[in-house]
Amino acid sequence: MNSLRHRLIGLPALTLLITAAGCSSADDSASAAVPSPGTKVAKLCEDLDRELPSKVDGQDRRDPEPASELTAGWGDPAIILRCGVTKPAKMTDPEADGAEVDGVGWLLEKQDDGAFRFTTTLRTAYVEVTIPKNRTEDGAAALVDLAAPIKKAIPEGIAD
């Protein structure tokens, strides 16, 4: 993780980067694989679940199936949050793209389907947020909406 070189980009640049994915429709199924973290991380994720807003990027909360305190979703197709995921392999890539939004560092990974996956950096638990390709135009707003709850529930540090 210490080898990850973050390229800090401002919110306007992040929005522009996300916009490049286009605005075509995405799979609107509301499902997410539930992570299986250890007890300490699971507790942090439960704390985060209690702090999450009812709206993200103007979208109402609509949690994915199966129901879990480790996952959350907003809108249709859903912006999906998964807490307690494993460290992404890209996290150790010195060329990986990263951003800081409202005090939360994120690893940025464009997915094959045009969606963007963001994973928190330098937090004691990894939180992953996937923004579907049809929401990428304004998707950076999701990271702004999630920053305060993440800062409150997931302390800074290195995840196990």
Image (cartoon, rainbow, N blue to C red):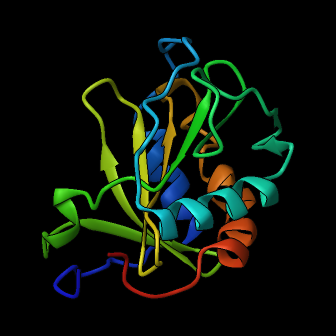
Q: Is residue 154 above or below residue 76?
A: below
Q: Looking at the rendering, which quadrant does residue 94 occupy?
A: bottom left
Q: Looking at the rendering, which quadrant does residue 81 occupy?
A: top right
Point out the residue furthest to the front here.
39
Picture quarter with the N terminus: bottom left
In this orientation, which residue lies closer to the viewer: 4 or 10?
4
127 to the left or right of 117: right
Q: Residue at x 50, y 29 (%)?
A: 132
On the image, the x and y values in percent for residue 63 come to 69, 29
70 to the left or right of 50: left
155 to the left or right of 50: left
Q: How many marks?
A: 0
143 to the left or right of 83: right
Q: Is residue 75 above or below residue 104?
A: above
In this orientation, which residue lies closer to the viewer: 126 or 4?
126
Q: Residue at x 42, y 30 (%)?
A: 33
Picture quarter with the C terminus: bottom left
On the image, the x and y values in percent for residue 3 come to 16, 84
Q: Residue at x 43, y 54 (%)?
A: 118
On the image, the x and y values in percent for residue 17 come to 42, 51
Q: Residue at x 67, y 57 (%)?
A: 46
On the image, the x and y values in percent for residue 66 come to 57, 22
In this orientation, which residue lies closer to the viewer: 144 or 10?
144
Q: Is residue 137 above or below residue 62?
A: below
